Amino acid sequence: MSDTSKASVSFITVDADDAGQRLDNFLLKRLKGVPKSHVYRIVRSGEVRVNKGRADVTTRVQPGDVIRVPPVRVAEPEVKPASAIAAADQLQIPAVYEDDALLVLNKPAGIAVHGGSGLSFGVIELLRAQRPQAKFMELVHRLDRDTSGLLLVAKKRSALVKMHEVLRDSHGIDKRYLALVEGVWPHTRCHVKMKLLKYETPDGERRVKVHADGLSSHTIVNRKQAWASASLLECELKTGRTHQIRVHLSASGHAILGDDKYGDAAVNKALPKQGLRRMFLHAWRLSLKHPLSNEPLTLEAPLPDELQHYLDTLEQTSKKEA
């Protein structure tokens, strides 16, 4: 993308990596701090032109299109970038796989994928601060802040578009998580299907509940190991709803240990003394075809040390009690 200015008007030439975006999304990405309502207004009024002609906000931009953007007042930049830059040297997130189109990270627990809601920065802001030369860097999907493991990042728009197509097809990608839950999970393998509805608590916190008006969701649960007090499960995501695994397991009577939203508060309170100081949920394996080359990829991130150590302690305690 190349920018030039003339009489305070900007002309932006669309490159291949930006092709296919809606005009409103294309503009919002470049006019940081400008309210969405203002962007819609300047498009509707004809102040924004595509190849010298009027366009709708739903217009898909194409390579070589020249976008005329009128002068707009951009809000003062937020402190998020500075915070990410300050952390860039201290916080390195390990990469499991990388090429010119795709980056797969092993995200630690405790860091959000996006800044916001009181957080100064997330994984994507950190990556952009660490790689200022990168032309494109966008999350393919999300992980909860307290969930660790494999996180996909697209380095080209063409890869992002293709990956979103793959994610919409339940057969296009195999995503597996490891979770430690309360009690003995009764099945070696079972399908959990529920309708999940997003809502907000009175203090504005995002939550999900089982509800007839919700969206269908599907997780295949495989029991890998069981002790008297807990079970280690491998969860295959067949749909990708918000908090899906957490709600499925909790609603089934076996909440994830350390889950502060859907777990048992009394059980969770005792966990730090036993050596578990976070939610036991980890995205450990991804199998997919490369979005551009179609090459099969199988990527793994072993359990973090703190989770593996807790399992080892659980095993040792179980043997002593036997």
Image: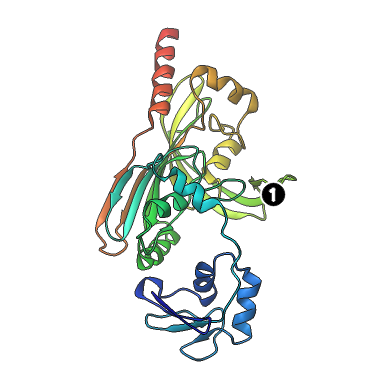
Give the residue furthest to the bottom: 53
Query: Residue beneath label 1, please?
Result: 200
Q: Is residue 214 left or right of residue 161?
A: right
Q: Is residue 100 left or right of residue 65?
A: left
Residue 120, compared with residue 33, is above or below; it is above
Which residue is at 60% across, 34% downward? 260
What kind of element bears circle 1? strand
- For label 1, the crowd category at 10 Å Cα-Cα, with few meaning under 14, some 14 to 19 and many 20 or more, is few
Which residue is at 48% across, 20% downward? 275
**Image quarter in which the N terminus is found:** bottom left
The kind of residue on which mark 1 rests is Glu
On the image, the x and y values in percent for residue 32 come to 55, 65
Residue 9, compared with residue 190, is above or below; it is below
> Is residue 241 in view from this perspective?
no
**Image quarter in which the C terminus is found:** top left
On the image, the x and y values in percent for residue 244 come to 54, 46
Rendered image coloring scheme: rainbow
Residue 123, compared with residue 310, is above or below; it is below
On the image, the x and y values in percent for residue 84 come to 47, 48
Residue closest to the eye, 181 or 206: 206
Which residue is at 32% across, 57% downward? 102
> Is residue 51 in view from this perspective?
yes
